[in-house]
Amino acid sequence: MSFKGIKKFRIGLLQGTVQAVIIWVIFILPIFTPVKSSGNNIFKVSLNGVYVGTLASEQSARKSLRDARRLFAKDSEELVLADASLTMEADDVLVGEIDSRKTVTAKMLEVLKGNESETLERSYTVKINKYSVNLSSKDDVLALLQTALGKYDTENAYSVELVTDPTREVNVLTSNVVSNEEVEAKQAQVKFPEAGIDQAISDIFEEIKPLIEEKSFDDYKLGLMNIDFGDKIEVVESYLPSSEITDLNTAIDEVTKDQETPQIYEIQSGDTLGLIAEKFGIPLADLIAMNETIDNEESTIRIGDEIIVTVPEPELSVVYTKQEYYEEDYEADVIYRDNNSWYTTHSEVVQEPSSGHRKVVALINYENNGETGRDIQKEEVTYEAVPKIVERGTIVPPTYIKPISGGRLSSGFGRRKSPTKGASSYHKGIDWATPVGTAVMASNGGVVTRAGWGRGYGYVVYISHSDGRETRYGHLSKILVKPGQSVTQGQKIALSGNTGVSTGAHLHFEILIGGSQVNPLDYLN
């Protein structure tokens, strides 16, 4: 081959190569990332540690994961969970092969299926105070609430519906109890407004409508008048594992069965531990165990004390009103007559009571099985009750104070060994050892009836009080009052001493009721 031929061959070969490169660039190059020098331009994508392909951007990887999630969940009505940890390894290359998003999405779907962890079922959480239960459907929620209502609505006259709670900003449902009779009446009633002559005729008959006669007992509708839940109910939709969803029968048992609920009870007049235990159906040993202040069945309880008892109550309370007819014996209210010359500690029964009998229609309010109040609608007395009449005093009786400040109680009231010759073995008062000259005060206001020497008492003062009682102050060193003088409570009447039959400086003090000495410590405030 000549030189010119060789040259032409090389030129042709070069032209063919260039054409091949151009064809490659046009048809092959789009699956490679174009050359860029501005940073990372290719991303190797892994899901849960499994390589699923290479894409041109982080955004594409995330879109592929969203698509894979959508495909993963579309065949299930429930919420399906799977681990999905997306990682990307970035690089900056001149030329690199990338995969289509469709291919990457398909691989991601396979990874998700292999990592499916749990299916969450659509459910409804019912919250009642601190109690909550998860049910599988709205129908179960309504069945639960209807069963709780039906425990007291034996005629199935009311129904429960779920409505949006207007007090909550989030989408929370609550209960609404409606009367079936009223709903049916509203549906059947089609009332058009009156006009013209019809309205005029109605107005005339309204004006001449006869007065309504008083109802007889037969005119009153008896039975359930209204009913509702006593606790706030909240219902929210949620997705939960099937293991956390309670079957309907179990939920009904939990919600409607009486639970032992602790309550505070205030001791009333006539109460004993045994009677309280019987009243609340609590074993006496359990009542003692739940109250730290009660040691045993002989422990003292006082009116006004508060103790813990348990009362059987369901998780969901129901409040309702019944109109009932009954006949009963009744007692008239006690009539009190004030006597302004008697002390409040004195009273006398002027008239003994006797029961009456009556017929009654009343609206009675209940919470669960316990009555909370009643409103009498009609009453017919068969025969009147005779009231108890009591005459009672209005004057607050005087109080008595310790007649000296300080002092040591050296001898109590009652039998004792004679402390010295001439002293009585039955002590009719109490003694406080105190230095000679200690101020002695009137224990209560009154009139001095004696002030002077009193044999064994030494110098002594007697004071008569308005409640008929008398006080005596003995073994004084100095008397500061005279017979017939009025004194007030706390007024200084003498100085203590050691006169009369005495073994040392002290004050002897007595209180007499009806002429007989009593233990002063029982009357001092």
Image (tube, helix red, strand yellow):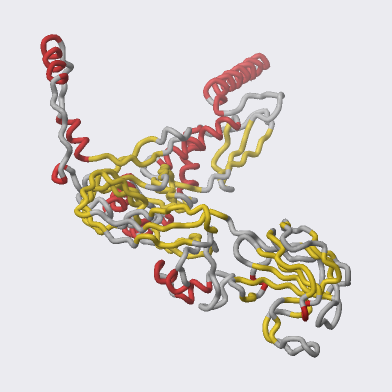
**Which residue is at 43% across, 64% downward?**
260
**The furthest residue to the top:** 196
Coordinates of residue 422 in the picture (x, y in percent): 77, 88
- Residue nearest the viewer, comparing 271 with 67: 271
Q: Quadrant of residue 62?
A: top right
**Which residue is at 69% across, 31% downward?**
92
- Residue nearest the viewer, comparing 432 with 33: 432
Q: Is residue 479 above or below residue 357?
A: below
Q: Is residue 131 above or below residue 505?
A: above
Q: Quadrant of residue 485?
A: bottom right
Coordinates of residue 35 in the picture (x, y in percent): 66, 24
Q: Is residue 176 above or below residue 16?
A: below
Coordinates of residue 215 in the picture (x, y in percent): 17, 39
Name the quarter where the N terminus is drawn. Answer: top right
**Which residue is at 36% across, 53% downward?**
333
Q: Is residue 6 left or right of residue 352?
A: right
Q: Is residue 359 left or right of residue 250?
A: left
Coordinates of residue 445 in the picture (x, y in percent): 69, 58
Q: Is residue 84 left or right of residue 518?
A: left
Name the quarter where the C terminus is drawn. Answer: bottom right
**Which residue is at 55% across, 31% downward?**
60
Q: Is residue 282 left or right of residue 249?
A: right
Is residue 247 in view from this perspective? no
